[in-house]
Image (cartoon, grey):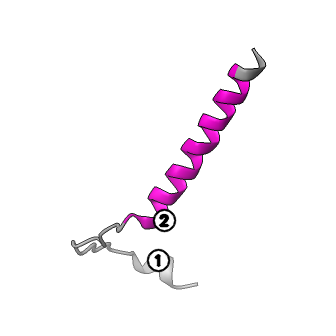
Amino acid sequence: MKKFGLFVFVILIGALLAGGVFLLTWDIPAPSTNVEKVIPNDRLTK
């Protein structure tokens, strides 16, 4: 049972490392649409 727990632990650490490397090397594209939001004047004056 100890070997199985060690095996699961090693697989979990490997998956976390692989996910971290994937996120570090992933070239996420920038948003290409404009976002316009109307802000009421009441929120700007104090």
Q: Is residue 39 left or right of residue 21?
A: left
Q: Secondary structure at mark 1?
A: helix
Please tell me how crowded label 1 is: few (under 14), some (14-19), or many (20+) other residues with Cα within 10 Å.
few
Specify the quadrant of the image occupied by residue 33.
bottom left
Q: Are marks 1 and 2 in contact (CB under 8 Å)?
A: no
Specify the quadrant of the image occupied by residue 26.
bottom left
Classify the position of the C terminus by image quarter: bottom right
- Is 21 situated above or below 46? above
Amino acid beneath label 1: Asp
Q: Residue furthest bottom?
A: 45
Q: Rounded to the nearest whole Å, what is the CA distance between mark 1 and mark 2? A: 42 Å
Amino acid beneath label 2: Leu
Mark nearest the camera among 1 and 2 is 2
Q: Residue at point 54% right, 56% down?
A: 20
**Which residue does the numbered mark 2 point to in the structure image?**
24
Which label is found at residue 13? none
Report the magenta residues as a range.
Answer: 4-26
Q: Residue furthest top?
A: 1
Q: Nearer the viewer, residue 44 or 21?
A: 21
Q: Is residue 42 left or right of residue 31?
A: right
Q: Residue at point 48% right, 65% down?
A: 24
Q: Position of residue 32 (x, y in %)?
A: 22, 73
Which label is found at residue 42? 1
Is 18 magenta? The answer is yes
Q: Nearer the viewer, residue 39 or 8?
A: 8
